[in-house]
Amino acid sequence: MTEGTDPAPERAEREPARLVAFSDGVIAIAVTLLVLEIHPPEDTRHLLHGLAELWPSYLAYIITFMLIGQVWANHHVMFDHIRHADRTILFLNTVLLMDIAFLPFAASVLADAFRDGHGERVAVVLHGVVFEVAAVVFNIIWWYARRERHGLLHKIDPAGARAIHRRFQLALVWLGLGTLLGALLPVHGVVVIAAFNAFFWLPISGELGAARRRAPRRSI
């Protein structure tokens, strides 16, 4: 190195631990707000009947809670392998959390529409679009992290990264189809979106990264 020449500055990296912790908090608040949208019946003289009439609220609560849980699980799968969180990652994750925070409202609209028997198509489309936006942001974050140099940790191999990418892309298609179907047949759209949740709890091949090879034991 010639005299007077400064060495190349090392790239500062912000670990995503605080981002993940903040995201966990927002997601926890979102799922808690879901139950607050279920209001007990006012007529306690016919309480059992009133509770039974709330079935759309129970359905919207269960589906949305499990789907937000799916978002939480895949968020951890993704950030288990992202090395650092630059401003782009922080911005995209903020957009994702803004979308998730909107879900209690979408779930309430869905429940009200099915309970009143009006506006079911619009309600299912709104509910599906909110999750579709989340899927879009997931794909953008993962695409950005993969293309960014040193964006992913070395513990995940290319096959594992592609497996996660394929699962995230499948979410785009699946939720999109459920949303479009909901615009025509609301009940069928809800069934497709609920089936998405059941399938996506299955583990992704390679999501934990490459297993460490054990060093061979020395013979005594």
Image (cartoon, rainbow, N blue to C red):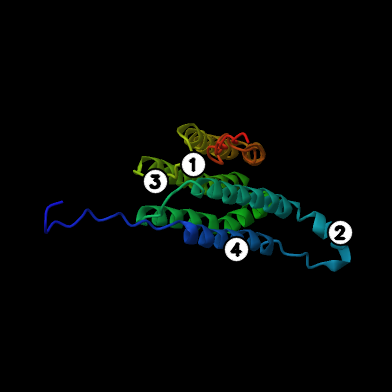
**Quarter containing the C terminus:** top right
Pointer 4: what residue? 29
Which amino acid lies under the numbered mark 3 shown in the image of this protein? Gly
Pointer 1: what residue? 155
Q: Nearer the N terminus, badge 1 or badge 2? A: 2
Please, what secondary structure does the residue beneath circle 1 have?
Answer: loop
Which amino acid lies under the numbered mark 4 shown in the image of this protein? Ile
Q: Nearer the N terminus, badge 2 or badge 3? A: 2
Question: Can residue 42 be spotted in the picture?
Answer: yes
Circle number at residue 81? none
Discs 3/1, front: 1
Q: Identify which residue is drawn at 45% across, 54% down.
A: 93
State how far apart marks 2 and 3 are (Cα).
Answer: 55 Å
Between 92 and 180, the one nearer to me in the picture: 92
Pointer 3: what residue? 151
State how far apart marks 3 and 1 are (Cα).
Answer: 12 Å
Discs 1/2, front: 1
Between 174 and 123, the one nearer to me in the picture: 174
Mark 4 crowdedness (10 Å alpha carbons): few <14, some 14-19, many ≥20: some
Between 137 and 39, the one nearer to me in the picture: 137
Q: Is residue 189 left or right of residue 168?
A: right
Q: Residue furthest left?
A: 3
In contact (CB < 8 Å): disc 2 and disc 3: no
Pointer 2: what residue? 48
Which amino acid lies under the numbered mark 2 shown in the image of this protein? Leu
Q: Position of residue 70 (x, y in %)?
A: 61, 47
State how far apart marks 1 and 2 are (Cα).
Answer: 54 Å
Q: Position of residue 169 (x, y in %)?
A: 49, 36
Q: Residue furthest front?
A: 220
